[in-house]
Image (cartoon, rainbow, N blue to C red):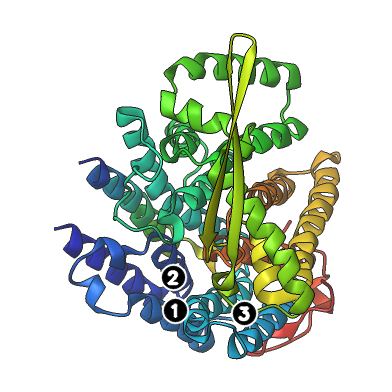
Amino acid sequence: MVDLALFLFVMALLALALKRPFLAVLAYLYVDIVAPQKISWHLLASIPISLITFLAAFGLWLVADDKADSRFTLRQGLLAVLLCYVGATTLTADFPAEAADKWAWVWKALVFAIFLPLTLRTRLRIEAAALFMVLSAGSIAITGGIKTALTGGGYNALYFFVQDNSGLYEGSIISCVAIAIIPLILWLARYGTIYPRGPLVRVFAMALIFACLLIPVGTQARTGLLCIGLLGVLMLRTVRHRSLYVGGAVVLALVAVPFLPASFTKRMNTIENHQADQSASTRIAVWKWTLDYVKDHPLGGGFDAYRSNKLTIETRDAETSGSTTDIETRTVTDQARAYHSSYFEMLGEQGWPGLALWLWLQASGLWQMERLRSRWSKRAAAEGAGPELQWQAPLANALQQAQLVYLLGAAFVGIAFQPFILMLIGLQCGLWSYLKRWDEPVAARPVTVRGVVPASAG
Amino acid sequence: MVDLFALALSHALLALAAWRLVLRGDLDRDPPRG
């Protein structure tokens, strides 16, 4: 039944795309985030649905969509350079077979991130892309949130739709993404037009945010707790009543603590005492290994280069009884440990040039969103500014907050090429390009019939 | 059961959003700015 329903849902989206080509782009966003072919066991699992939706999105855009307002921005160029560079390191990778496996999905995610902004020509398309991303990721957050509320979850024990530990179905990744989408949920609830502002939308948004906040509790991913903390601080910048917000947050935290599972509290305590925690100590050892590795391999070792590491880790556990403290030291050996950090993932796999490109891509996004936020806040506050000038700055702000949450989570999880985040970057590029066009006088716009116009600015 | 509920709710909202988008004229072209 579920199998058939998911199949019909995707087919219906593709059928609607024949009338409105942009629906195929939304179908691809949905398929890439939810991966219904993993939930399905027959119909969708037996066809290359991701490839079909991508071809539909690109083909219909090429044939049937207007491209007069499409622009190619500097950040899309950065993504294209990164794609070529990553392709080159894959050819010379230390572990060619494993590198080819990762390349098989990374190139698709990068190509789609380059393509997405070309389709985001109207305000409604930008909103629709944000809504589909949020609802798709939200579907995983809803099931995870409810199960956490009912059972408390557990490390590596929270089961989403599938028994799978890849993509958004991995605990640390969904914890980071669930917190990153909260600013977008708030924006959609306030400025959305597909589901306009109202009591029902507000209730659903609050429930979805609550579910998102429960994901780090259910997965017991320490990264998620740090992401919640960062988002809480970032929101101080825009909330109307700061003291009320801070007071409310403190009360909420105090009320929530007794309800948290003991296993969650115990695991979170290891953030402070990382020397006793083998997982944390291993990470630090891998990061040190990576720094040594790039001394000999400054251009990186290609995807999965971490497989050559061999680590010796010393953990120390202090136990105090009365006036005496016993320190127990253990030596553990390990090998082929993953980076557990996007920064070190980029450094080890793509070397200094790859890391520099990736950081440039991220930093330019933060800078662009800050510029949009600043410019459009002033316009929104100007006398006589109508409702059509109110949504831009908050969206830039939400996309910046989402990216900052990701960048913190990325410090502890290897998600440098996570497709969802690359979509977020595509959305930023689309917003930047769209608002840049907003300022172009109509007469000054280049006249094109079918071609894509290169954008001069970043 | 929880999975079914989450799938049904999210997919119903996605489907309704898609249907609403098809009916919107401003999906492919922004309305003229005042």
Q: Residue at x 60, y 56 (%)?
A: A312
Does residue A284 lie above or below A11 as drawn? above
The mark tally for this picture is 3
**Disc 2/disc 1 C-alpha distance (Å):** 6 Å
**Disc 3/disc 2 C-alpha distance (Å):** 28 Å
Q: Residue at x 35, y 43 (%)?
A: A158
Crowd around label 3: few <14 · some 14–19 · many ≥20 (10 Å): many
| Secondary structure under the numbered disc 2 in the rendered image | helix
Crowd around label 2: few <14 · some 14–19 · many ≥20 (10 Å): many
Q: Nearer the viewer, residue A241 or A230?
A: A230
Residue B5: x %, y % from top left? 25, 42
Residue under circle 3?
Answer: A302
Q: Nearer the viewer, residue A47 or A371?
A: A47
Residue A109: x %, y % from top left? 54, 73
**Disc 1/disc 3 C-alpha distance (Å):** 26 Å
Evaluate if marks 2 and 1 touch, with contact meaning CB atoms under 8 Å apart.
yes
Q: Nearer the viewer, residue A400 or A448?
A: A400
Looking at marks 1 and 3 on the same chain, the residue that comes earlier in the sequence is marked by 1
Residue under circle 1?
Answer: A54
Residue A173: x %, y % from top left? 51, 52
Does residue A62 lie above or below B30 as drawn? below
> Do discs 1 and 3 belong to a common subunit?
yes
Q: Is residue A411 visible?
A: no
* Badge nearest the viewer, 3 or 2: 3
Q: Amino acid at mark 3?
A: Gly
Which image quarter: residue A166?
A: bottom left
Evaluate if marks 1 and 3 touch, with contact meaning CB atoms under 8 Å apart.
no
Residue under circle 2?
Answer: A28
* Badge nearest the viewer, 1 or 3: 3
> Do discs 2 and 1 belong to a common subunit?
yes
Say which chain tag 2 marks.
A
Crowd around label 1: few <14 · some 14–19 · many ≥20 (10 Å): many
